[in-house]
Amino acid sequence: MARILVTDGMAPEGIEALQAAGHEVEERKVDADELLSIIGNYDGLVVRSATQVTPEVIAAGVPTLKVVGRAGVGVDNINLPSATENGVIVMNAPLGNILSAAEHTLGMIFAVCRNIPQAHHALIGGKWDKKSYIGVELHGKTLGIIGLGKIGKHVAEVCQAAGMRVVAYDPFLSNEVAEQLRIEPVDLDTLWAEADVITMHVPLTDKTKNLINADTIKMLKTGVRIVNVARGGIIDEVALAEALQSGRVAAAALDVFEQEPVAADNPLLSCPNVITTPHLGASTEEAQIRVSTDIAEAFNLFFESGKIINAVNVQLRVDPSIDAYLDAAEKLGSLLVQTCDKPLRELEVRARGDLAKFDTRPLGVGALKGALSHICDQGVNLINAQLIAKDRGIELTTSSTEQLQDNHSRLALRAITSDGEHRVGGSVIDGQLRLLRFDEYVLDLPIEGHLLILEYPDRPGMVGRYGTILGESKINIARMEVSRIDGRGEALVVLTLDDPVPADVLAELVEAVTPDRAYAVSF
């Protein structure tokens, strides 16, 4: 059970989903000072756009705080670098408001082309003025979309039905997808020159900040209409206001602003050809329920199994087909470092067989997490594992090869230390991790719980010696595997145990067996 704080409100369905999973949920409004004083008592924090999750808040939350969830898409109010550095996962709900944002964009497009809000305002003010509010038809016009994600695609589909030609700029839009969607992929210069209506559906980044500015406005078709229901800051607001006043831009419809709530002296508010709404893109009953239940589902999954979905500061996308190997990689990394006699300098993770057909880079991070969890005193997770490794001078490399005789999936780890190399390998069979290799020894043993690993010159009576000691210590042997390279030479025995081996028992085993190597391993 986790303690979860909700500060900006959450649909009842989301709260109920968290509580049904056994979590303690507290919903309350807090100011900045109060949040700093209480955040250390919670495992999770759910916010919308009002709460500012600053570096100070994150620092006050760790080590208890594990995850921050944004019930929505934008995470501008959450300090991602600080969260990443401290191993705090930041999740959002990117799919819950797709339809709402797309429909709000469509409403803005229709309204800005037909002057609907201005005409309404004049009419209720007592003016029956038809001539001042003559609009333009969408049919036959060109819509320019910047960012063709799910929202942009939905907008394109509806506008095509209205008879518009659609051009789009998106660096990740393939010609095949564009052809399927009946959309013309273009560069930005072409879009600026040809679009009658421009709508943006991109996040606010260094590359998109002030994407529309004084210079790009000069490239636009005279009389263009601009719609922004994405993020404030994508448009240089002063430059847009000047273009609206000069007539270079015929009209604009804006749901988002660089500063929110928008300042009363913002020049755009004094432009009669501007339609504004107070960040309503996701403000539908349906969207509020979806983003709340989506973030609740993500929290439940994380606290139940450690699985991370929709995390904006984890660049790991694990194909569901190899989910089991993420846990396997972590266990093998843990096993590897617990059987290294010298500090780890480099960790190499290699996927073989069918496993190599997938993007296995996340498995490398999983193996690194397992290894680091035993050699550093701070909390390690998939967020900060690579940062911690970098600070400690540990290099991670990953590779793949499909060359394997039986073509089954296997994972091989190699540790490089000051005194050489150490290797382990395994495979997930029927949902269970099996240890297949330990250095040069070949094995086939399910690994779980606790292990005892002994390497010694093979001779009669050895099993009785360590079996007796473990029995007297009330440590039950669940499974046992013995591997020899040749004849009566060195032997490696791996025991899976129901309980860990205490240090004094391990010392007694070493004295009785006189092994070349002895390790007590726990996961």
Image: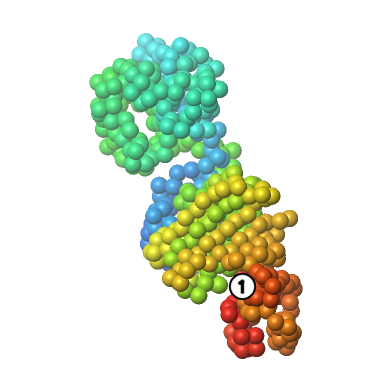
Describe residue 220's horizontal placement relative to residue 499 as left or right: left
- From this view, report whether residue 501 is shown above or below residue 209: below
Of residues 253 and 98, which is closer to you in this image?
98
Per the image, label 1 sits on a secondary structure element best described as: strand
Q: Quadrant of the N terminus?
A: bottom right
Q: Is 320 rendered above or below residue 472?
A: above
Residue 9, visible in the rendered structure: no
In the picture of the structure, the residue carrying the numbered disc 1 is 522
Label 1 Cα neighbours within 10 Å, binned few <14 / some 14-19 / many ≥20? some
Where in the figure is residue 383, as x and y percent of width and height?
Answer: 48, 57
Of residues 183 and 221, the one nearer the viewer is: 183
Percent position (x, y) of residue 421? 50, 66
The quadrant holding residue 456 is bottom right
451 w.r.t. 146: above or below? below
Residue displayed at 40% across by 50% down: 77
- Classify residue 395 as left or right of residue 67: left
Residue sitting at 66 percent across and 49 percent down? Answer: 405
Can you give x and y, in whole percent of width and height, for residue 315 in the image? 48, 49
Residue 182 versus residue 230 in the image, above or below: above
Based on the displayed image, in which of its 4 quarters is residue 209 positioned?
top left
Q: Is residue 124 left or right of residue 193?
A: right
Quarter of the image with the C terminus is: bottom right
Question: Residue 111 appears in which quarter of the rendering?
Answer: top left
Residue plotted at (63% across, 67% down): 441
For badge 1, the amino acid type reads Ser
- How far across and how far down the image is residue 306, in percent? 59, 58
Residue 314 visible to an observer of this rendering: yes
Identified at 37% across, 10% down, the residue is 131
